[in-house]
Amino acid sequence: MVITYQGDNYFKLQSGEDVILIDPTNQRSFKGTILVIKTEEPTLVAAEKKDNNIEQSFPFLINHQGEYEIKNIQVKGVSAGYDEKEKEENTIYQINFDEIKILCLGHLKKELDPKLLAGLEEVDIMILPGGGKPYLNEAQAAKIVRQIAPSIIIPSLFKDVKNFLKEFDATKLEPQDKLVIKKKDLKPEALSVVWLKP
């Protein structure tokens, strides 16, 4: 699997010809994509006209809770709680893709309920938002990481990731263009931070 970061909370996950996009900010990269996961508002995708027929040229879209299976990809969206102030419900997604279990915390703004934590499957890779308001601060983000104990943590939405890296003694870490990983390369509960640059 290859994971690249496009900025904001936009990630591309690819295994062979299969592509998943998380929170894409444009539709130009939809070609060849089989699945789009939106952790905030839905993406509106227009159908393309071809030979006087309307052809659906967009991937399967997941933008709410539930269990889904597309090809050999399993996705489970669960509520992380309702935010009274923002009047919105936060949804987190568990993705099983290429035998790797990915937990995407989307735009999480508060710590996870212990009952929710207990129901999460073993996590290989966690995509974690943070960096302070409106998202988790560095200490809250680090606490969630230690509670879930993934093999790899990928920070997202941080304005400055360096304070988060201090939480894991990873201040010498350099940003990478992409993460290339196979299931056999993962070390359980390793808590390794991978800093991807957009």
Image (spheres, rainbow, N blue to C red):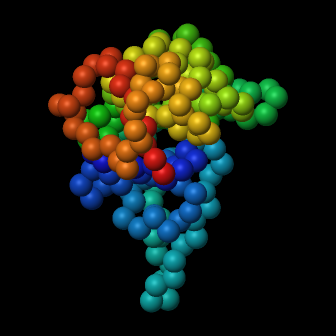
Counting the numbered discs, the total is 0
Residue beneath the point at 45% across and 27% down: 171
In front here: 89 or 133?
133
Note whether residue 7 is visible: yes
- Residue 161 % position (x, y): 54, 34
Note whether residue 105 is visible: no
Residue beneath the point at 36% across and 54% down: 19
**Residue that lies at the very extreme toward the right in this rendered image:** 85
Taking the image as shown, residue 57 lies to the left or right of residue 109, namely left
Residue beneath the point at 41% across and 30% down: 172
From this view, report whether residue 71 is shown above or below residue 78: below
- Residue 181 % position (x, y): 25, 39
Q: Can you say which quadrant of the picture contains the N terminus?
A: top left
Quarter occupied by residue 150: top left
- Residue 3 % position (x, y): 36, 46
In front here: 31 or 189?
189
